[in-house]
Amino acid sequence: MLSAVIVVHWLMDPTHTLTPYGDRYAKAEYWDDRFEKQVGGQGCDKPLRFFDWYMEYAEIVKFLPPADAIHDVLMVGCGNSRLPEQLVKRHGFRHVCCIDLSKAVIEGLRKHYADNGDADLGARLEWRCVDATEMGSSFRGRRFDLIIEKGTLDAMMCSGTSDAAVAMLREVPKVLQPDTGRFLLISHNPNRDSLLVNHGAALRVREVRLGELSPKAMLINALRSKFGKEPLSGLEKSTAMVEAMKEVRAAEARKRLRQFVSVLRSTKQGPRGDDGLGLVKLVDDRLLWNKSLADSSSSTPKSARQNHCWVYVMSAPASDAL
């Protein structure tokens, strides 16, 4: 459960938002300035603060392949996420390469993990300042078994054009293992489908599912719907904060109820895998949306906000891998 104490401390950073807004989210300068404050950059005496967009490891693990099938993982737009560390320590991936456009965050995290005394973890995490629209030339033939992207595409779509997002999608097949590799794209942007349909020809969508937003992300979602682009600092004692906290707690209660029902069903019927929702089926490599399931799958009533994001599992056919 998200405590009020954590929320108050966390909201004092006025940059927090769920759905990115404005073209600043597509600029390296904005992220360098933000991460200088969050990862203990030059002139900053604050300890490193981690932040995960949309989903945290406890939810993402539902969509991850077994560790023994994966040799090399790429996280695109890693930011100051704790996920890379968790992918290694909790899920058991051998090696995770983390890239970001911001030199500040890459240098800050590289130093953090070099200084933390865990030599094995440090050796299994690689940090590189790479533009996601130039991955092919940056990695020069290196192929990854799994690529994870969480919110980077959404940030790129805030520039006012889809150019950067399209460029990133075109780069993925150049660094993904053909056929066997998987690209995990996690998005909360309503324009994602048209972008993938029109510009994702070199990627084959294997599955589309729903993932639960973290409590922090749900809270930001609720507050952003009320305050738009206004900074969220200073809201800790407001009526809006109280209402948003109630909404998040109600959503969490519904989630626990669903999990309880799922356990009962699995006990009676046998295991059925995780409780993720498959929202598409493939016929002749074409996506057919299960609209009735999609409409009924939201974790909240229709009157509440969308407390889930979309998880796309994709691959790059050998003939399209360049």
Image (cartoon, rainbow, N blue to C red):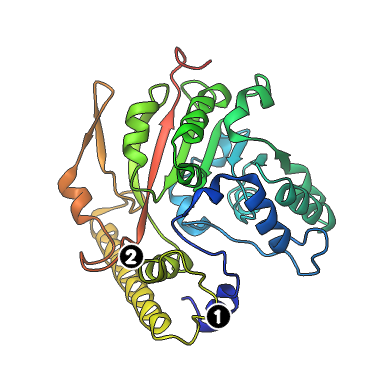
Give left or right: position of 269 versus 217: left
Kindly state the secondary structure of the residue where label 1 is placed: helix
Q: Residue beneath label 2, please?
A: 259
Distance, label 1 to label 2, CA atoms, is 29 Å
**Nearer to us in this view, 152 or 66:** 152
Residue 187 in picture, x, y percent from top left: 42, 47
Residue 118 lies in quadrant: bottom right
**Nearer to us in this view, 101 or 98:** 101
Q: Residue beneath label 1, please?
A: 8
Decide if residue 132 is in sight here.
yes
In the image, residue 153 sits, relative to residue 214, either above or below, namely above
Amino acid on which disc 2 is placed: Gln
Q: Are marks 1 and 2 in contact (CB under 8 Å)?
A: no
In the rendered image, the residue lying farthest to the left is 292
Give left or right: position of 189 versus 3: left
Label 2 neighbourhood size at 10 Å, few (<14), some (14-19), many (20+)? few
Amino acid on which disc 1 is placed: Val
Residue 31 in picture, x, y percent from top left: 64, 52
Residue at left 58%, top 49%? 91
Among the two numbered marks 1 and 2 on one chain, the one whose residue lies closer to the N terminus: 1
Residue 318 in picture, x, y percent from top left: 47, 15
Residue at left 51%, top 48%? 23
Residue at left 27%, top 65%? 300
**Nearer to us in this view, 298 or 130:** 130
